[in-house]
Image (cartoon, rainbow, N blue to C red):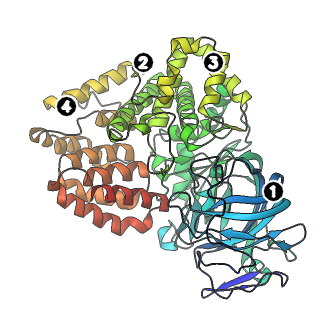
Amino acid sequence: HYILKEGLLQLTLANQIPKIERFSPLSALPSSICTTTSNPRASTMAPIDPHSFTDSTHPLTNHVALSLYFDFSTSTIISSALLTLCAPHTGDLLLDTRSLTITSVIDPTNNTQLPFCLSSDVDPIKGQPLTVSLTNNSKILITFVTSPSSSALQWLTPPQTFNKKFPFVYTQCQSIHARSIFPCQDTPTSRVRYSAKLNIPHQLSAVMSARHVERRAPLAGGDADLACDESLWCAEGRVVEEFTMEQPIPPYLFAFAVGEIGNREVGPRTKVFAESVPAVLDAAAKEFAGTEDMIRVGEKLFGNYDWERFDLLVLPPSFPYGGMENPRMVFLTPTVIKGDASGAQVVAHELAHSWTGNLITNKTNDHFWLNEGFTTYAERRIVEAVQGEDIAALNIGIGWKGLVDEMERFKDNMEFTKLLTNQEGVDPDDVYSQVPYEKGFQFLWRIERQIGRPAFDEFLKKYIAAFKFQSIDTCMFLDFLETNVPGIEKEIDLKTWTEGTGIPPDAMEPVSNIYTKIVSLANEFKQGRMPSEEEVANWHGQEWELYLENLPKSVEASQVRSFPPLDCRYRLSESKDYEVKVAFLQLAIASRCSEYYNVVEKTLKEVGRMKYLRPLYTALVQGNASKEEEKIFAQRVFSEARETYHPIAQSVVESILSKHL
């Protein structure tokens, strides 16, 4: 057991582990524990994933039992993890870690030390391998402490929360950040069940991507599982929230949030959770009132919903994504609460992941399209059934424009316009894009058009049933496709679609009257014509988003004058819908309309969703030297807003600035 105090570590584990006087995340451990500071098997290991140290010759973990003591004063989690392997192993076992301090590795069957080494070589993408030497072991207990700079965690101080009374912490583990919370085989090839005990201040509550078991007082006599000293675990004012995930999930779906959290019931399988602010909870409950209808449509299309609950957690504005499909507890940005139920389309996407992504998972991030292309297709089928064909067509149209824009973004590195990519040596957060979503959708839509929707629906159900709770790659999908749709390879160039760059010639824009009308109006803007109030009378956020996305990104001086009148008439820069606001602000930046820079600054400081940060910062800094004023502006805003962003978003913005400055 150990107590952290003023940078000192006192460690006594049944008097068996040597005392460590002082430590840092990279400090060398005593020779009895660590005999080398580098990975002794680096030259012979057979990686299973370009983003993981996991060795293909090692058994995979099938269960993790976590005990987590949350120390908000230091923004750390004092922890233990009991890993159960699928088979006993003799020899080295490699685990992924990032910014963790490993304090002991123990054989829980006899309470003895196991030799281990945390490499001093830090890979900028993968982190540090933890090597544990085993002798016919199938279980290992690791004690460790997270870092305040953990890439998966954002710790919010009370002033950064709505009520400003209590702190808040939440996770974002996709793509490769679970390793910064606990040592693991952090690859989607590995699927694990888990249990977790979260020891937190009694004023707070916790949610997880798992079934809630109970909220109780801490227990003496081993409840901490060696995570920390019993006096700390059982201290006054602490409670334990206990959870279990009984279905095998990839590590990136591990998730929790701890804070002052309330909830509202919105359906038989759904509660909406958020910070305990009535206005936020009520708005979320109203926005997502139709969730049960979407679940039923999903079940009709794709088979039974296998996760029991589909709860939603609306996080603080710093959450870096629109949504995260954590099973049983989807995480959402508050920017999806728009007041017109259109934010439910993000929920439809995360719901669709319950079948494609969570039930069937890409083996590695090279095959990310298997998660996101399928889910985008499934999302649009759900939206079409619930909200109608016109709304689905708008979604496809917005997605098509996004795909075309990504071709421009990656024009100097077309590798990332493929579905099947090679991400060796590449940080997946740096190349995150709409390509796997929209090109993946286009591929599946092409197959649907070829064989007909009824046949494709049957194929999808068969596919989901065949690979349920498995991780697969592109080759496995194509083999299954060719087996179950004989001759498809003669009708569609499968290799071009999966391995070719760019947009294949048989991809297709949507066909609908409303889509065509909006694109036509956007084209007329080039001649200086704004849409009339009558033409936009029934427009909501998506119609405006599609219109703005199709306006020219680079405009002539004569056209710049059109933006203020457009905004004056329709107040786009003041829109409550961030999709609309950010699309307009991108045009304003491209047109050097500096009168909107105060709105740009306010937007960059009030939200942390990367969908908005990436294009706004990029618009400010990319281009010629004449944009020096904008570049200085971007640097200042980021320096002031940085601490409000999640670590993943911080890294992405830093990458944008370093590329252009």
Residue at the image point whose x is 18% and y is 42% from the top: 563
> What residue did someone put label 4 on?
525
Q: Quadrant of the N terminus?
A: bottom right
> Marks 3 and 2: CB-CB under 8 Å?
no
Q: Amino acid at mark 3?
A: Glu
Cα–Cα gap, marks 4 and 2 = 29 Å
Residue 499 percent coordinates (x, y): 49, 29
* Number of other residues with Cα within 10 Å of mark 3, as a class: few under 14, some 14 to 19, many 20 or more: some
Q: Amino acid at mark 4?
A: Phe
> What residue did someone put label 2 on?
506
Q: Is residue 258 above or below residue 87?
A: below
> What residue did someone put label 3 on?
482
> What residue did someone put label 1 on?
84
Cα–Cα gap, marks 3 and 2 = 19 Å
Q: Is residue 661 above or below residue 231?
A: above
Q: Earlier in the sequence, mark 3 or mark 2?
A: 3
Horizontally, residue 30 falls left or right of residue 451, namely right
User: The residue tagged with tag 2: helix, strand or loop?
Assistant: loop
The answer, for residue 337, to whether it is visible in the render is no
Horizontally, residue 40 falls left or right of residue 112, namely left
**Marks 4, 2: nearer the viewer:** 2
User: The residue tagged with tag 1: helix, strand or loop?
Assistant: strand
**Marks 4, 1: nearer the viewer:** 1
Q: Earlier in the sequence, mark 1 or mark 3?
A: 1
User: The residue tagged with tag 3: helix, strand or loop?
Assistant: helix
Q: Earlier in the sequence, mark 4 or mark 1?
A: 1
Q: Quadrant of the C terminus?
A: bottom left
Residue at the image point whose x is 55% and y is 28% from the top: 386
Q: Earlier in the sequence, mark 4 or mark 2?
A: 2
Q: Amino acid at mark 1?
A: Thr
Residue nearest the observer in this picture, 499 or 300? 499
Cα–Cα gap, marks 1 and 3 = 37 Å
